[in-house]
Image: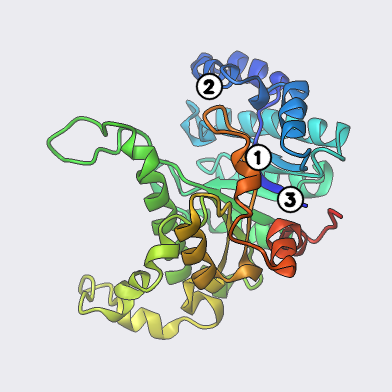
């Protein structure tokens, strides 16, 4: 059995209401409408059935709600998306056993309220956050009230990379070319966010915090040891920021990055699967069949090639997901 734990879906009613709220969302609508399975339930079901009918945990896709014109508009957009996701999940619990909500972090007060509403009233399992919000790191103290609320509600966090073509690769150019901002930039953004969350002690401040990283933990499967350079190398930071001294203050999981996170979707080649297994270990990772307009849906069964040991297959397929979300899928 497989569970897709990071399945993007934006219900039609949410798209229509977002466009009414802000005409700029028509760009999102145009992109989503290019693939029926990203917004139409029946189309999603047909595509799911082609690869075995595996259940999906659904959440919204881009754009980040922090890009709305104002914090107030971002909060309203979050309510629109979350209401639509909840309605869709509740109508099809066998197909969509759970969902994660969205937040507009540039409106901290509204995001705190929305966390409580999501978990208490809508039945969400957690929230999807981007690797940065309006250019600020997730460990920024301004977002602490949101993480306090997430911890209070025992909510799971799904972390999705955020970077656009405006994050240029070279200072002499105006924008990133050849989609490197996504193909290479997204894994980099995920990696940096993971390091920052661990290095700043967030897992010490919030014991039991569960963070699911997209794209198999970005670059961490290959560069886990290099992630410690900020603490152990000669680079000591600025006079006001001594990383090696800060490292001594960390305890518990924050001291070891790969014990903090879970990683999803080891389907990008055998070498990457092996690297992930050696760093995250089977109890901290799982696979997911991918539904994406540019992906070959038949790649999903192939991602099992490297996992022939039955208990490991079961853990990576769905049991780890059950532990993270504290629910049963099978």
Other-residue count near label 1 (Cα within 10 Å), few / some / many at <14 / 14–19 / ≥20: many
For label 2, the residue is 28
Quarter occupied by residue 319: bottom right
Sooner in the amino-acid sequence: mark 1 or mark 3: 3
Calculate the distance from the C-alpha at mark 2 to the C-alpha at mark 3: 29 Å
Q: Visible in this render: residue 140?
A: no
Calculate the distance from the C-alpha at mark 2 to the C-alpha at mark 1: 17 Å
Q: If the image is split into quadrants, where does the C terminus sit?
A: bottom right
Calculate the distance from the C-alpha at mark 1 to the C-alpha at mark 3: 13 Å
For label 3, the residue is 2
Q: Residue furthest bottom?
A: 248
Q: Residue furthest left?
A: 172
Most foreground residue, 269 or 74: 269
Pointer 2 with pointer 3, Cβ within 8 A: no
Other-residue count near label 3 (Cα within 10 Å), few / some / many at <14 / 14–19 / ≥20: many
In the image, residue 325 lies at what x, y percent? 75, 58
Most foreground residue, 134 or 161: 161
For label 1, the residue is 7
């Amino acid at each position: 059995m497989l569970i897709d734990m990071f399945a993007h879906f934006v219900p039609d009613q949410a798209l229509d209401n977002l466009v009414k709220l802000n005409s700029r969302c028509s760009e999102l609508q145009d992109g989503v409408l290019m693939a029926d399975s990203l917004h139409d339930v029946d189309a999603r079901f047909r595509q799911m059935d082609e690869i075995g009918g595996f259940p999906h945990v659904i959440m919204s896709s881009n754009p980040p709600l922090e890009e709305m014109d104002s914090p107030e508009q971002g909060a309203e957009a979050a309510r629109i998306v979350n209401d639509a996701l909840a309605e869709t999940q509740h109508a099809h619990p066998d197909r969509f056993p759970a969902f994660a909500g969205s937040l507009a972090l540039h409106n901290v007060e509204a995001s705190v309220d929305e966390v409580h509403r999501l978990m208490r009233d809508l039945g969400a399992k957690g929230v999807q956050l981007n690797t940065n919000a309006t250019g600020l790191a997730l460990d920024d103290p301004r977002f602490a009230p949101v993480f306090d609320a997430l911890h209070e509600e025992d909510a799971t966090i799904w972390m999705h990379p955020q970077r656009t073509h405006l994050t240029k690769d070279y200072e002499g150019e105006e924008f990133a070319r050849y989609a490197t901002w996504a193909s290479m930039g997204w894994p980099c953004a995920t990696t940096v966010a993971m390091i920052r969350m661990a290095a700043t002690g967030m897992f010490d401040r919030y014991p039991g915090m569960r963070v699911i990283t997209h794209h198999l933990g970005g670059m961490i499967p290959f560069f886990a040891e290099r992630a410690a350079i900020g603490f152990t190398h000669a680079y000591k930071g600025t006079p006001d920021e001594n990383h090696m001294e800060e490292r001594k203050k960390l305890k518990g999981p924050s001291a070891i990055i790969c014990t903090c996170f879970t990683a999803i979707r080891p389907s990008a080649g055998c070498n990457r699967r092996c690297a992930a297994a050696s760093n995250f270990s089977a109890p901290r990772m799982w696979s997911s069949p991918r539904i994406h307009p540019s992906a070959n849906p038949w790649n999903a069964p192939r991602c099992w090639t490297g996992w022939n040991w039955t208990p490991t297959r079961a853990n990576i397929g769905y049991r780890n997901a059950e532990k993270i979300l504290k629910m049963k899928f099978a």
